[in-house]
Amino acid sequence: MTRRPMSLQTRLMTAVIGFVSLILVIVAVITSATLGATLERQLEDRLKVYSGQITQLVNTFPEGLASVDNISVRLKPVPGLLLAVSSTEGGTSGVVYDDTAGDLGGSEALSTRELAQINASLAGRPTGTVSLEDFGSYLVVVQSAHNGVNVVTGLPRTEIQNQLATLLTVIALATIGGLILLALTTAITIRVGLRPLRAVAATATRVANQPLDRGEVQITERVPASEADPRTETGLVGSSLNKLLDHVNDSLASRQKNEERMRRFVADASHELRTPLSSIRGYSELSLRALKQQGGEAAVESTTTSLERIQAQSLRMTRLVEDLLLLARLDEGRELVYGTVDLTQLALEGLSDARPTAADHHWNIEAPDEPIVIVGDAGRMHQVVANLLANARTHTPAGTSITLSVAREGDEAVLRVHDDGPGIDPGVRDELFARFARGDSSRARQTGGTGLGLAIAKAIVEGHGGHLTVASEPGDTTFTVRLPLSPATASAE
């Protein structure tokens, strides 16, 4: 059976409380040991003082008279004092004093067994600790008087044990209370601290339940701003998720837009192909009918006309298919064949080819005397120039001035196509270079365009590491191509 993993809150609380508990236990042990050692030293100092006083008192007795009873008459004992006297004449005897028998205090004699325990605990040492069954634990010390009497003096360790027990009880109660308070505080702090993560998880769950794989999708779910403060670690997660959702939402919108554009393109491409196919079919049927019904020169003439129309429509379909194939190959980076290209010469040739197609336009060129050389595909760059000039020619009225200019700006070669026509509709300008987009379907139908010319030009320019942009307003439209110069040309400057 798989063990259920602990939550982050549980793990954090376990770690914090366990670590603090360990610290408190260590502090309690160190405190108790330090206090116990201090109290033991104090008790030992007191005991040495009492032992010295009693030994001096024993020295005042004649030989053979230093007994416990005689000493008790002249001694003012402290409560709990243990006294044992050992001499060769009187043997060994001992008492323990209490504070219940007047000024001299009451006493209780030590048994032979207890005296033996004291002797064994000392074992020849001057100081020792002994536990007596009837009196508890004692710290004892032995000193020898001048008259040969050994005096054993002891003080009870009960007070030390009581103080240590009280200390440990207080520490235990304080530790338990502190740990309970710590657990509550930690639980509240962690719960509040992890609230942004729970908000992130809830938001991610709601987003995950949305159908993002089809149709028009807009992600409106976001982590609340109060839980997405990037100045905190957990808030940074929420802020990052919001940014991610913004990007995903933009990507989904772009995907939907591309899908709609693709559907429009498929419809346009289908129409473009259906028209010549219908013409081919019609003229083919007309030719067959003429051959069957008319015969002779009339049939030949009708068939010739039909074949010419079939050829024209076939060429139209071929151009469309070739444009689609070119875009696919440019996407794969397989279409360009690089070499040295004189952009100045290429512009002159392009303008020469375009001028006869629109004699009602005014054609101009601005080019330097020295060549501007780039590394690229001459054929494809010629196609870019031809597409830009054809675009300017097709979408401007008669009498429009079209200027083709070539210049060198820094490390770039710049080619511009400018016209003073009516300009580009702002609604079309944003999608002017988009593939499969046609800004004016009626105009495209009239001119026979497929809406792929500028998309192809942009793909070719970007394949050369350059950029194609447009700026347009009524009376001033300019398409700008920027291309990196060849290394030799750039270093010659």
Image (cartoon, rainbow, N blue to C red):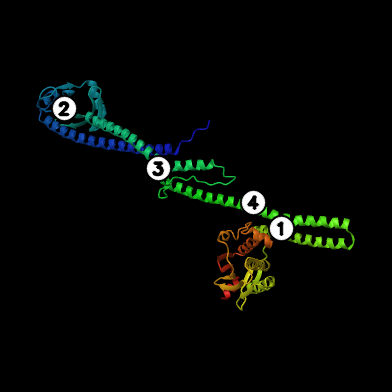
Residue that badge 4 annotates: 263
Q: Position of residue 171 (x, y in %)?
A: 29, 34
Decide: is 437 above or below 36.
below
Mark closer to the observer (1, 3): 1
Relative to 443, say whether 122 is above or below. Answer: above
Closer to the chain start, of discs 2 and 1, is: 2
Give amino acid for label 1.
Val
Q: Secondary structure at mark 2?
A: loop
Residue at image x 76%, y 55%?
278
Which residue is under mark 2? 79
Asked if the residue under mark 4 is in contact with the one under mark 1, i.e. CB atoms within 8 Å, the reply is: no
Numbered-mark total: 4
Tell me the residue that label 1 is attached to: 321
Q: Mark 3 sits on what residue?
A: 193
Dot placed on the residue nearer the N-terminal end, 3 or 2: 2
Residue for point 88% across, 56% down: 293
Residue 23 percent coordinates (x, y) = 34, 39
Q: Residues within 10 Å of mark 3 (few under 14, many from 20)?
A: some
**Left or right: 125 in relation to 199:** left
Which element is circle 1 on? helix
Residue 453 location (% of width, % of height): 65, 62
Residue type marked 4: Arg
Cα distance in 3D space between marks 3 and 2: 60 Å
The amino acid at mark 2 is Pro
Dot in front, 3 or 2: 3
Q: Nearer the viewer, mark 2 or mark 4?
A: 4
Residue 465 is situated, as x and y percent measured from the top left of the image, at: 60, 64
Determine whether, in the image, residue 114 is placed left or right of residue 327: left
